Amino acid sequence: MPLRSRSSIAGLIRLIALLPWWLSLSAAFGAWWFLHPLAEQGTLPSLDSLAGLGDPAILGKLLQELHRDPWQAMEPLVPFAAWAGQYLLPGLLGIGALLSGARRRKRGRLFRKALNNPKAVSDGMDWQQFERLVGEVFRRQGYAVEETGAAGPDGGVDLIVRKGRKRYLVQCKQWRALKVGVKVVRELYGVVAAQGAAGGFVVTSGSFTEDARQFAASCDLALVDGETLQYWISMVSGRPAPEPSSRLCPLCRSPMVRRTVKRGGKAGTHFWSCSKYPDCRGTRV
């Protein structure tokens, strides 16, 4: 098989693998259910008739018929296309479902590992596993997550997350010793502005410099340090979230103030909100 054909098929399988496994599997059964009856409606063209397409006279006649009545000219080929498609399409969808399911299990193992052993986030994972973990945390918060496949630990935007019509760019930094500086935050802000995204996140297993926090607070970027990431992991798992070492905003690390819900079904309940609201919308329960 030519290299280009193999790469096209592999690209299609990777695209299918981005779908939930159950959706791909359902589509595979649906494709078989739709194509199998079509494959049985007529006789398959013989090898001799297919080989005859190489004859210029036969090919010219076929082109004339296509120009005059495309559907009538292609009708004899429908059973052949359906016969091939009833195996090819469900096969590709099935492989994509298997890959999607395998990826989901891997992400689940990483999430449980981080939940049960917070130190594993910085010491027990490589940068690729860290990106998958961050993606899983966003998924469990209701975001649709796209992994960009950046080719290294500093490959730029690592995830694209969506909620509703809003699109956010995420950069992951598994830095153990160094604090993430303002340069990284500025670079992401430039990409967010260039792509017209609603905002962005810089997520690290460590911490940020004060310059980075001040810059992020002035634009549509959220900084998620190791402590905040662990808070998110506990929160989306349903376990009691660990109490932060200080009452700081999980997004911009500014002091938080206690507020009361004034409307709706939760009126009268209390929560912690960033002191920079509405410029920053970080909250803690």
Image (tube, helix red, strand yellow):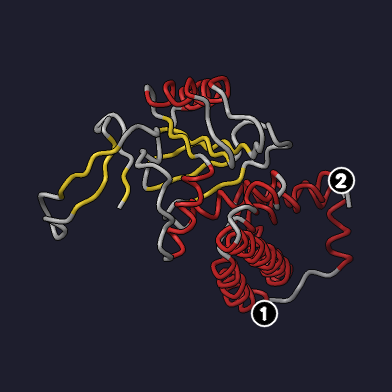
Residue beneath the point at 64% across and 58% down: 17
222 and 28: which is toward the camera: 222
Q: Position of residue 57 (x, y in %)?
A: 83, 48
Q: Can residue 140 be seen at all in this image of the molecule?
A: yes
Secondary structure, mark 1, is loop
16 and 255: which is toward the camera: 255
Q: Can residue 76 be seen at all in this image of the molecule?
A: no
Q: Position of residue 148 (x, y in %)?
A: 62, 41
Mark 1 or mark 2, earlier in chain: 2
Residue type, mark 2 in image:
Leu
Residue beneath the point at 46% across and 45% down: 228
Which disc number belongs to residue 3?
Answer: 2
Residue type, mark 1 in image:
Glu
47 and 115: which is toward the camera: 115
Which disc number belongs to residue 1?
Answer: none
Q: Position of residue 72 (x, y in %)?
A: 61, 60
Q: What residue is pinned by disc 1?
A: 40
Q: Position of residue 37 (x, y in %)?
A: 61, 79
